[in-house]
Amino acid sequence: MTVDLLRFTTAGSVDDGKSTLIGRLLYDSKLVYDDQLAHVAEASRRRGGDGTLDLALLTDGLRAEREQGITIDVAYRYFATDGSASGGPGRRFIIADVPGHKQYTRNMVTGASTADLSIVLLDARRGAVEQSRRHAYISALLGIPHLVVAVNKMDLVDWDETAFRDIVSEFGEFAERLPVSGLTFIPISALHGDNVVARSAHMPWYDGTTLLAHLETVEVAYDHPDETAARFPVQWVIRPGGAAAPAGGSSNGHRASAPASDYRGYAGQMASGALAVGDEVVVLPGGRTTTIAGIDTYDGPLAQVIAPLSVTLRLTDDLDVSRGDLISRPADAPTVAREVEATLCWMADRPLRAGDRLLCKHNSRTVKAIVIDLIDRIDVDTLQRQTGVESLGLNDIGHIRLRTSTPLAFDAYRDNRATGSFILIDEATNGTVAGGMIEGPSEPLGAANH
């Protein structure tokens, strides 16, 4: 099933023109309001420009970003097109403009985690640098299926086809080893608008689509909820005497179909798949089975819930269910284990070492965890695994073995982003220090594993 919404991210090294590209997309698509243009024109004039608009100011919203000329935080932009660039029906877009500086790789991981397509910008004069390869590799790790390599600043190499082809050859060899299903190269000039929304008269040798036309037509398939495994992480238990459900409704604003005095519901957001009243379900990690007695919402009961709706489930049996448990169907239940192997992006200044103790937040469950082994570290230039490492430093990517204090119910990240990802938290500072993608269990527990 395809949809008319595309989430994409822009990534690359510092000064490759990410913010300018997004500004150009919005400006040439006539999606910038007059007051925004006036503000950007005034800001461009104050910065001593030559009278042209500094389109990067449309996305570099923080004062520190404007002063330093770099993107620091993730900037989200929303826009829609009518299809005039591609001759199609148009599309809605959510853009995450992520930082290019290595210091802010953690922000890049955050912004790209929900994207369907990643645009990696390369400076035509420099080609692929370390941070460009790092962002492409992280995009692939995050399961983003489509990668667009936009070779920017073609005006600074006199629109030279050979310069473009050399970059295609060099970066293409690197990208072939990445797990992406679609790889597209487009020569552009974000500053002048060539091949961004309109075709460039300066590059007649390029016979591909413009960037916007590609974004409007690229096929991003989503599995139907009935075709994916049902996953419902419990966020809150609603019951009389605790988080009491008042007469005629529940404590979280969901209108109940059971009397308040007897009410016991489990609130959360459907992470994937679908569940219906009467379905047999298993509550993990405990492994007890029951059936769904009701599905409550603010607007009244439902017969079925599909991702990503937030609802309150009622179960037929009075089981011991708490925050962090996961409800699924028994036939396609996730793995339950205390030890997992995962790919980790380390985001803290202090290094990670085997034996470090942290908090692991996986869906709605937060548990104590210990790093029992550093398996290897990835060299982002060669994609080779370096074994025998003693630590992971800031922005390093590696494979680890993690043991948690209580079992987790999870899927491999490649199968389910929602239940295959986690973050690690420093107990002392409460700061997020790593993002992880589960590859699988290293020590299965009991019959619930398969």
Image: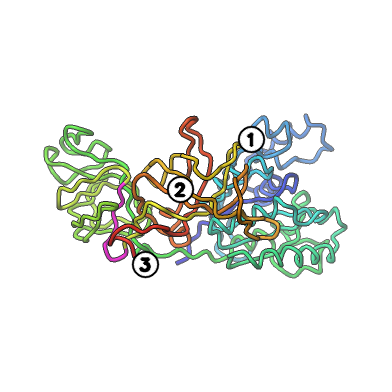
Comparing marks 1 and 2, which lies closer to the viewer? 2
Toward which corner of the image does residue 330 lie, by quadrant? Answer: bottom left
What amino acid type should be assigned to the residue bearing mark 1? Gly
Horizontal arrangement in the rendering, residue 102 relative to residue 224 (left or right) = right
Q: Which mark is residue 85?
A: none
Label 3, secondary structure: give it: helix
Above or below, 309 relative to 210 = above
Q: How is the image coloured?
A: rainbow
**Front position in the image: 390 or 105:** 390
Image quadrant containing the C terminus: bottom left
In the picture of the structure, the residue carrying the numbered disc 3 is 227
Q: Residue at x 24, y 49 (%)?
A: 313
**Front position in the image: 209 or 146:** 146
Query: Considering only order in the chain, which callout, 3 or 1, is on the residue closer to the N terminus?
Result: 1
Tell whether label 2 touches label 1 (CB within 8 Å): no
In the picture of the structure, the residue carrying the numbered disc 1 is 61
Mark 1 surroundings: few (<14), some (14-19) or many (≥20) residues within 10 A: some
Label 1, secondary structure: give it: loop
Name the spot of residue 375 as percent of width and height, x first: 55, 55
CA distance for labels 1 and 2? 29 Å
Q: Which mark is residue 422?
A: 2
Give the magenta-colored segment's residue range.
Answer: 325-332
Comparing marks 1 and 3, which lies closer to the viewer? 3
Horizontal arrangement in the rendering, residue 226 relative to residue 217 (left or right) = left
Name the spot of residue 83 as percent of width and height, x first: 59, 61
Name the spot of residue 295 as percent of width and height, x first: 23, 51
CA distance for labels 3 and 2? 24 Å
Image quadrant containing the N terminus: bottom left
